[in-house]
Amino acid sequence: MKQQGLYGAVPLAHHFLRGRLAAGDLVVDATCGNGQDTLLLAELVGSDGQVWAFDLQAEALARTGERLAAAGLQQRVQLIQSGHERLAEFITAPLQAVVFNLGYLPAGDKAVVTVAATTIAALAQAANLLRSGGFILIAVYTGHDEGAEWQAVQQWAAGLHPHSYNVWQMRQLNRGETAPFLVVVERSG
Ligand SMILES: C[S@@+](CC[C@H](N)C(=O)[O-])C[C@H]1O[C@@H](n2cnc3c(N)ncnc32)[C@H](O)[C@@H]1O
């Protein structure tokens, strides 16, 4: 079956990014992987914007770098080989968006996978770095760790104060309960 349109958490995240990002924005891809999210971010922030793209794996950064170079957009992106749990060591600027696409590198080493402790540490730093109106998008997979990470993400997001953050979970109702879902955290105050 060919999947199109808003099938899955990633196309929904991209729809959101296209609607909310503008030229000059400062944004982070916390899990750059094959670079699809990084490429869209680089396109949307324009030549005056800046993207920081994190991944633990050199292979992921290389794939992302190739994708950016093919599009001529590598100048807008700083590739950082580090865990995203060190986000705040690299970035102090108020951010418009931080994108997380959890799980493992497609067609890569499945042993290197996002895990609850470091994901939550990174999310907490990202939430603090958001400017007013800035947002975090988290594509969450339920299949890879028997629930520890996706439940930790839900718990963390649900605990954010509603005076300061608007928090949403979006799930496709016509797919199974284990289908990936999208969490959106917007800084409102
Ligand atoms: C699902 S993939 C990301 C896909 C990517 N956004 C894309 O467009 O292709 C998840 C990535 O997270 C990376 N990763 C795992 N733990 C990480 C961590 N603590 N910090 C940063 N990246 C991590 C993996 O190496 C993997 O490349």
Image: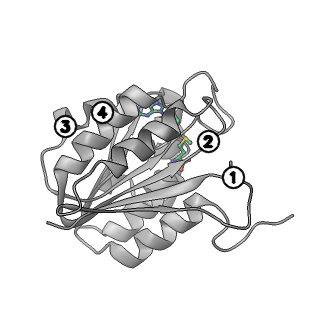
Question: In the figure, 189 relative to 151: above or below?
Answer: below
Q: At x 59% / y 62%, what residue is drawn?
A: 171
Mark 1 highlights which residue? 177
Name the quadrant of the C terminus: bottom left
Q: Is residue 24 left or right of residue 8?
A: left
Mark 4 highlights which residue? 121
Label 3 packing within 10 angstroms: few (<14), some (14-19), many (20+):
some
Q: CA distance from mark 3 to mark 4?
A: 10 Å
Amino acid type at mark 1: Glu
Q: How far across and down, in percent of the image, does residue 62 sit?
A: 50, 36
Choose between 141 and 96: the one closer to the eye: 141
Q: Is residue 171 left or right of residue 58?
A: right
Q: Is residue 167 left or right of residue 181?
A: left
Q: CA distance from mark 3 to mark 1?
A: 34 Å
Mark 3 highlights which residue? 88
Amino acid type at mark 2: Thr
